[in-house]
Image (cartoon, rainbow, N blue to C red):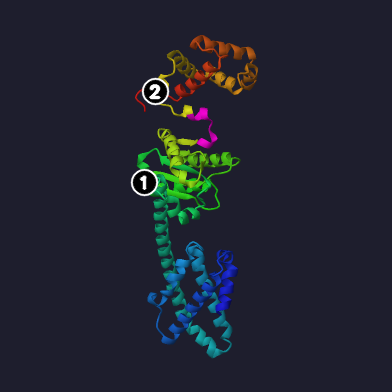
Amino acid sequence: MVDAAVKAIFADLPAYRGNPDPALREDVTHHVGEHYRRILDSFGREQPISRDDLDLTRRHAAQRVGQVTVADFIGAFHIGQRVLWNETHAVADDEPSRLAALRLVEPITRYFEVATTHAAEVYLEAQLLLAATGERRRRDALEDLLTRALGAVQRHDDTLHAVGLGARGDCIVVTAMPIDTQVDDDEHAIRGAAAALSRALKLRLAPLVVLRHREIVIVAPAPSPEDVGEVVERLRGVQQRQAADGIVLAVAMSTVHHGVARTADAYEEAAATRDLLLVEGGLAALPAMSAFDYLTIRNDPTARRLVPEAVARFVREDLAGGGTSVATLRAYVAANLNVKQAAADLHVHVNTAHYRLGRIAERTGADPRRIDDVIELVIASRLVADDPGPGAL
């Protein structure tokens, strides 16, 4: 009967059947056998089973956490009950045995009611304990890495290995923070956002994810250069969906760093970039940026004051009027200063493009044919366009 139950468990439950643990079948066999013996013993004593009689389940539950879900763990009990019913029915081949089998209905039902309830409780208890222990270890590992503690990589090798981080492998840091401080009290919302960002990386192993009050920090193996674009778009999708649900995140992704010991460097650049987005939220992925993009994202009052007033005034007025000249300038730069190509990209006549560039030169004093002037115009168009106004930080 034990063999039949074990065979049915592995046949009916994919979580058991596909588990690579070579000791799993032997452990399940022992567990099933112990329960069947307890059932028979309770029949002999004619006493109902109690939770104290089922303490053996605690050790097995602790072993199953992380291997099978609680639903599969309880499902194995139901299969054991079904096999027991089938075996009982099979031997009830005459009237006396059928009457005896009927008398077993109540105690068998009662046994498995108590056993499954107890199993669910001890499984969840073991799961919470494991989660708390794992979260503490992940937090300790991250804090040691961020403070550049001596021997941090070696001390937390097991924790780092479990999340796919090797001492010499390339890594990135993704950090996020809700821009609304009212979200800080909603830990479930922040945990949900952390899980969504983690899933967006699509890694074989779940990365190192730690919540530091309102801040989400993820340390993960770096994606290949070919995959960076897709990863960025998935992260952007998460940020947008979270915003649609009322949780606006500022999200930043560091450049690739060689070796998990460089986690602090990766975190510092990601956090500094993220903090630039705390007004409106959004995503800034440094691996997908050019050096020019990075330099112009740091839009602060000093940078804006360095823009000549004539240029700043022209950009503000043009943007207020629809931004035709600024759009022409950007198309001109994107076309490698080729006016004909810029006109084609804008779907205007080349003379129109020349006229607009001439107006820019006339209003700003900058020459669109000089690279230094063009760079200053482009930087100004970005800084002034993003200027939050007087008094903003």
Q: Residues within 10 Å of mark 1 (few under 14, many from 20)?
A: few
**Magenta stretch: dominant secondary structure:** helix
Q: Position of residue 19 (x, y in %)?
A: 56, 64
Write down the region rendered in magenta: 286-294
| SS at mark 1 in the image | loop
Q: Earlier in the sequence, mark 1 or mark 2?
A: 1
Say which residue label 2 marks.
302
Residue sitting farthest toward the top: 362
Three-letter amino acid code at the position of disc 1: His
Secondary-structure class at tag 2: helix
Q: Quadrant of the N terminus?
A: bottom right
Q: Residues within 10 Å of mark 2 (few under 14, many from 20)?
A: few
Tell me if residue 71 is in the magenta stretch: no
The three-letter amino acid code for the residue at tag 2 is Thr
Q: Residue at x 57, y 40 (%)?
A: 228
| Residue receiving disc 1 | 213
Residue at 43% x, 45% y: name it: 217
Side (left or right) of 238 relative to 50? right
Name the disc covering residue 35, or none. none
Residue drawn at point x = 42 percent, y = 73 percent: 114
Which is nearer the eye, 265 or 103? 265
Cα distance between the residues tagged 1 and 2: 31 Å
x and y, in percent, of residue 305 in the image: 40, 19
- Relative to the observer, which residue lies in front, 150 or 36? 150
Q: Is residue 227 above or below residue 79?
A: above
Do we see residue 245 in this rendering?
no
Q: Nearer the viewer, residue 278 or 138?
A: 138
- Quarter occupied by the C terminus: top left
